[in-house]
Image (cartoon, rainbow, N blue to C red):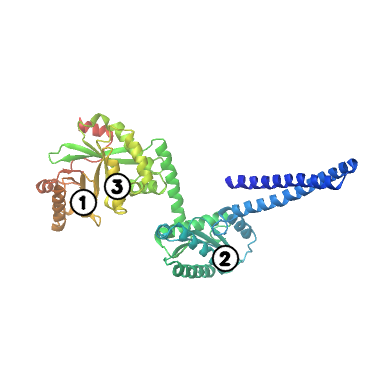
Amino acid sequence: MQRTAQLALRITLIYTVFGLLWITLSDRVLNSLINDPDLLASAQLIKGWGFIGLTALLLYFLSVRALTTYQQAFESDPLTKLLRHDRFKLLLSQQLQHLSPDQSYVLVYFDIDHFSEINKTVGHDKADIIIQRLAKHLRSRFAIEALLARLAVDQFAVASVADHGEQKVEQVYERIMSILQQLSIESGCELKATYGVALAPQDAKHAKGLMWSASEALRLGKQRNRTQINFFNPDLSAQQMQAIKLSRDLRFALENEQLTLAYQPQFNMHKQVTGVEVLVRWHHPEEGPISPALFVPLAEHYGLIDKLTSFVIRQSYSELTPFLGRQLSRVSVNTSAAEINNAALIDKLEHVVSSLPDYSQYLQLEVTETAALENLEFARSQMVRLGRLGLRFSLDDFGTGYSSLSMIKELPLHELKIDRSFISSMLNEHGARTIVESVINIAKGYKLVVVAEGVEHEEEFALLASLGCSEVQGYLLAKPMPIDALQQLLT
């Protein structure tokens, strides 16, 4: 919008200056050359028509230039001069329409691996130069035989007619590899890419479908086979479509509060309830019960995790308020790696907790080792920030990660939860028992509460009591239960 206004202002200024100069200078010239009033009037009339003709011609050239500039900006990426998405799609559609029955069409998407890290390392200016050089090499190596586009910051597309599809893909791959190797030497940065490939008419006959197929192949490749060629796979695509459908259903369920909560009580060694862990349940109207192991990652992937956490906190507050500070001193809610490592999501979490100020003193967030390990310093800063609201923190699945001891030292923790895999094997395996005993002693040294998960047998409970464990949870004492059953247990 700003660029359009600038072009319009430029045309107006040029027209105004030209008009003022024409009127001022032409009047002086005519007055100096013609003394006859009638002849002067005729000359003024001719001058007026001349002014209209010249300004119309001037406006034509200025408009053509402005519109050409605007069209170029709309159709091509300003940094690389490669095609933008919409123009690329239009030209791709035209080429597919003229594809003969004995021809195939190859569309290759490639994405520079870890380009955001390169951007941080070398700076935006140098990163832009790398992108510009990449585009220049692409134009040079593929000449006019292919459509070239920049679809995102570090994502590009190469599309070309091919008599032998997979052979053409290999040629495109080798050229791009060669370009990236050359740029790696020039820039001093190791540049590699992941490739997604779709073929027409096998994968799709139209531009929109072909572009989606290539994008899907690239997405799956980034998850599984970085730096390799990944062909579109209809079977995997069907799985992805199912995931998309489930994510939409999950969004609807969250918006309409169709999820429910279950609570697993936690007990001290006198078998008195001290707190609960909140678990979320989803009963799909068509698919039946959906495991949290399935829908929580979906929520993370499709940007719903903040809504899910908000629902759990608000709903648990609504259901547990009568018991807070009386039968319950702690309410534990799981948080995901996507949240604890994202400042924007922490902002939303802080907003939810701040809206329930009398809940924060009972609320405890459970953080897994793997989530905290993604960026330990950042996780610590966010936990300190939330701790100012009164929140406490538990390190979940303790002992399954790689840097557990350092995390106890670095993070502002109040509780450790020993993973059930150690609890279930400690009666028969000396190593597991030693680990459990060591964790309990370490936690005592840091004045942390220790909760043993998955306690299912009296022998396990007795051993944990003898080792000095603080609390337990598991099927021995109580299974996860709805709020009505919890109310009966507590009262």
Q: Circle 3 sits on which residue?
A: 381
Q: Is residue 354 visible?
A: yes
Q: Nearer the viewer, residue 6 or 356?
A: 6
Q: Residues within 10 Å of mark 2 (few under 14, many from 20)?
A: some
Marks 3 and 1 close (CB-CB < 8 Å) = no
Q: Secondary structure at mark 1?
A: helix
Q: Which residue is mark 2?
A: 139
Name which residue type carries label 2.
Arg
Q: Residues within 10 Å of mark 1 (few under 14, many from 20)?
A: few
**Can residue 109 be seen from the camera position used here?**
no
- From this view, report whether residue 338 is shown above or below residue 257: below
* Secondary structure category for the residue under label 3: helix
Spot the residue most to the left.
466
Q: Is 245 rendered above or below residue 215?
A: above
Quarter of the image where the N terminus is located:
top right
Of callouts 3 and 2, the N-terminal one: 2
Q: Where, quadrant-wise, is the C terminus in this rendering?
A: top left
Kind of residue indicated by mark 1: Lys
Kindly indicate the quadrant of the structure image that contains residue 46: top right
Q: Which residue is mark 1?
A: 409
